[in-house]
Image (tube, rainbow, N blue to C red):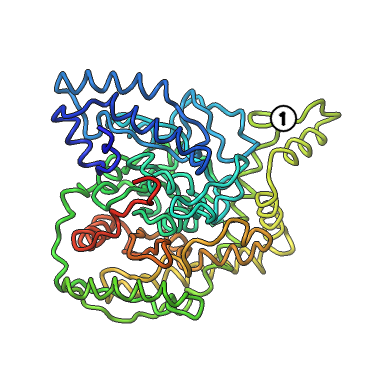
Amino acid sequence: MTDLHRKTLVELAAGLRARRFSSVELVRAYLERIEASQATLNAFISITGESALRDAQAADAALAAGAAGPLTGVPIAHKDLFCTQGVRTSCGSRMLDNFVSPYDATVVAKLKAAGAITLGKTNMDEFAMGSSNETSYYGPVRNPWNTGMVPGGSSGGSAAAVAARLAPVATATDTGGSIRQPAALCGVTGIKPTYGRVSRYGMVAFASSLDQGGVLATTAMDAALVLREMAGFDSNDSTSVDVPVPDYVAGLEQPLAGLKVGLLKEFFDKGLERRTEKCIREALRVYESLGAVLSEVSLPSLPLSVPVYYVVAPAECSSNLARFDGVRFGHRCANPRDLQDLYRRSRGEGFGAEVKRRIMTGTYVLSAGYFDAYYLKAQRVRQLINADFIRAFQSVDVLMGPTTPTPAFAIGAKTSDPVTMYLNDIYTIGANLAGLPAASIPCGFVEGLPVGLQIVGPHFSEARVLAVAHAFQRDTDWHSRVPRDYA
Ligand code: GLN
């Protein structure tokens, strides 16, 4: 059974239930693929092979007894910022290199309860700050389509793992694009739900008003299945919203005839690489042939997303990361002279350069003399962006555009210029600022590198976004392409 990795999660779950193969067999096959890829891709920070095989045995027993949940026996990987009880949660940082969480994040607990088996924890940019997975303390992840290229970030490990079929699905988080951008660059399907749809309890915080957990998978159908299990109200997260979770899988087969698609005018700008644009335009033609009605929509405040984000996100991060003080948990420097020395050196040694840059920027914009000029103004513009989206959704059902301006770039190409790196998220950040659900789906290739189409919907319209993505995947096969070395 060497071709199990070619199946989708839905097929794997059905195969397990029909007892065509066992969970132990399946988990073993994925663990072998992970081990074989580590030296090249570096997609994982921790591999939990022993517990995965133990859980797989229990899953096989449950399947035999006919007591299976929706995901019983199916392997999954978690981005290493979801707390996992008894397993290190590093968040890609030296600061948490020795941190073993005493509890499971709600997302992890829910997926476990549905029967999923954890293969390991995936590599990521340090504290989810980055667009290329190059800020990880554990080294960069490589793109399975071309190992000289970045996989995107910050969920680069999760995206590379799914693209190389090291796991059928992986969890991820998106603060400014970290699910959609790596999904686009690795040629997989990713969805960032509405802010508040998925519990943030047990997710190491970066920017609390923007962070949202979601899924990376090969198909929209697989993403729908996993999202259905991980979404929902959680009293442990005060920003979790108590709105019933629809059956995203049952809602997939919606006809597209008459669907009103708004093309984000501001996204088809001069920064959009020509061949990437061509792929996007071809994908839009597929939607037209499926009955969608396309029109151009302008969101005039949207070009301000990047500057607004790089005030709001660092501000929140400087506050959230204050908890890493060398006292309670995380890295502690050796032989501190006094309390100040303990703080300074623990933080100085524990955090990498990008995290320090964000903490300094955030502290600056929140300081007494600059608060009004930067933070308050950014919050105001954020409301304008939000209002632009709300207005747009009065006339269209979904918005579409590119996920990124270019396909994957070379490792090292942008590390010396943070602002160039930040501009990678120019098309993704708007949805975070407005708290909207958004997906990226594979829609073509430029010189062997995948291109992603972005679909943004109104608040709590995940079912619609997934159905729109699914309709495209019924008609095209971009999502089923596998990098040559991992086929
Ligand atoms: N690339 C963006 C940043 O560096 C977004 C990261 C994210 O979504 N976690 O902040």
Which residue is drawn at the image coordinates 28% and 26% (left, top)? 25
Question: Residue 480: x, y in percent?
Answer: 28, 53
Judged left or right of residue 176, residue 419 is right
Question: Residue 106: x, y in percent?
Answer: 39, 35
Residue highlighted by disc 1? 332
Question: Toward the viewer: 288 or 486?
Answer: 486
Question: Toward the viewer: 342 or 9?
Answer: 9
Identity, as a three-letter code, of the amino acid under mark 1? Arg
> Element type at marker 1?
loop
Q: Is 183 rendered above or below residue 322?
A: below
Which residue is drawn at the image coordinates 20% and 73% (left, top)? 292
Which class describes the residues within 10 Å of circle 1: few (<14), some (14-19), or many (20+)? many
Judged left or right of residue 402, residue 363 is right
Question: Residue 227: x, y in percent?
Answer: 30, 45
Q: Which corner quadrant of the image does residue 290 belong to?
A: bottom left
Question: Toward the viewer: 78 or 474?
Answer: 474
Question: Residue 31: x, y in percent?
Answer: 39, 30
Q: Is 477 rendered above or below residue 9?
A: below
Q: Is 296 rendered above or below residue 374?
A: below
Which residue is drawn at the image coordinates 48% and 68% (left, top)? 406
Q: Is 392 rendered above or below residue 159?
A: below
